[in-house]
Amino acid sequence: MKSYNSALNIKRGFVYAFMIILALIAVVPIYLLLINATRTNAQINEGISLIPGTNVAYNWHALTSRNFQIQQGFFNSLYIAVTSTILTVYFSAMTAYGLHVYRFKGRNFLWGLILFVMMLPASLGFIGFYQFIAKLKLLDSYIPLIIPGIAAAGTVLFLRQYLASVLSIDLIDAARIDGAGEFRTFNTIILPIVTPAIAAQCIFSFVGSWNNFFTPFVIISSVRKYTLPMLVQMLRGDIYRTEYGGIYLGIAVSIVPILFFYAFMSRYIISGITMGGVKE
């Protein structure tokens, strides 16, 4: 018995050590980013430091003196990310629900098509997407950045698999017997059940939309419509001097909403797992 406990403790120690290493890999780059946001160019060029500097005020001045409209960039990115996330998650959940619950002709073909689309690289059809948007006269608009998120094959796959593991068809039949319509059943019964999965997909969708640089860079041409990643790209400076401290500070500012959104949504994931682990 003692040898078994000893082996179990050793395995547990390896697991904890591995988790600590993963945590450091995730946290250390963010910590170094925040440290460099407080240092001067000379200090940054000297190498890595774990001690914060005292150059935050100058870096902020270098950041804001280059027509860095941080408030406008925040609003633009927040508007696109929140709107795209809501549409992506809601309609993906509705699609996943329809594919899981309803039995109709062509259901398997449609599911296979979604899987096929998910395996295609996103950049493969970008030229055709740009030409299509140009013909619709939607260039320099947020619509091409928001509406296409409705067709999120990866989100549909995740939510359908989650529904298959937690949803009982008897629950839906009971709701129908009680007189609930299909949309009411989905909105009041299904959505609360899949809250942990929706929270996880909200995080992925929000982060992906917030960090998206290439698509807005090609479609958006007005500076007042620039997203925050596009504004950060403008901080490279001229050929004579680049304010690396200001660039690090701009990047640090741009990741703050991601951290807050993750902290807000992760509690729903944890609470959902806790509720699912309790049997009455």
Image (cartoon, grey):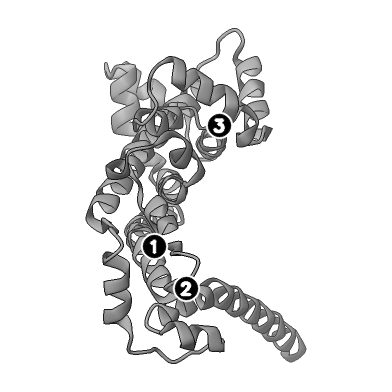
Looking at the image, the residue that sits furthest to the left is 71
Residue 126: assigned label: none
Q: Quadrant of the N terminus?
A: bottom right
What SS does tag 2 mark? Answer: helix
Of 187 and 26, nearer the camera is: 26
Q: Are marks 3 and 2 in contact (CB under 8 Å)?
A: no
* Mark toward the start of the polypeptide (3 vs 2): 2
* Mark toward the start of the polypeptide (1 vs 2): 2
Where on the picture, by quarter, is residue 219? top left
Residue occupying the point 52% across, 74% down: 29
Q: Is residue 260 left or right of residue 128?
A: left
What SS does tag 3 mark? Answer: helix
Q: Are marks 1 and 2 in contact (CB under 8 Å)?
A: yes
What SS does tag 1 mark? Answer: helix
Residue occupying the point 53% across, 24% down: 129
Q: Is residue 40 above or below residue 236?
A: below
Could you tell me how far apart the alpha carbons at marks 3 and 1 are, in whole angstroms? 26 Å
Of 59 and 107, nearer the camera is: 59
Q: Amino acid at mark 2?
A: Ile
Q: Write down the residue under mark 1.
A: 255
Q: Write down the residue under mark 3.
A: 153
Q: Is residue 264 above or below residue 206?
A: below
Q: Residues within 10 Å of mark 1 (few under 14, many from 20)?
A: some
Q: Is residue 108 left or right of residue 265?
A: right
Q: Is residue 236 above or below residue 41?
A: above
Residue 30: assigned label: 2
Viewer-nearest of labels 3 and 2?
A: 2
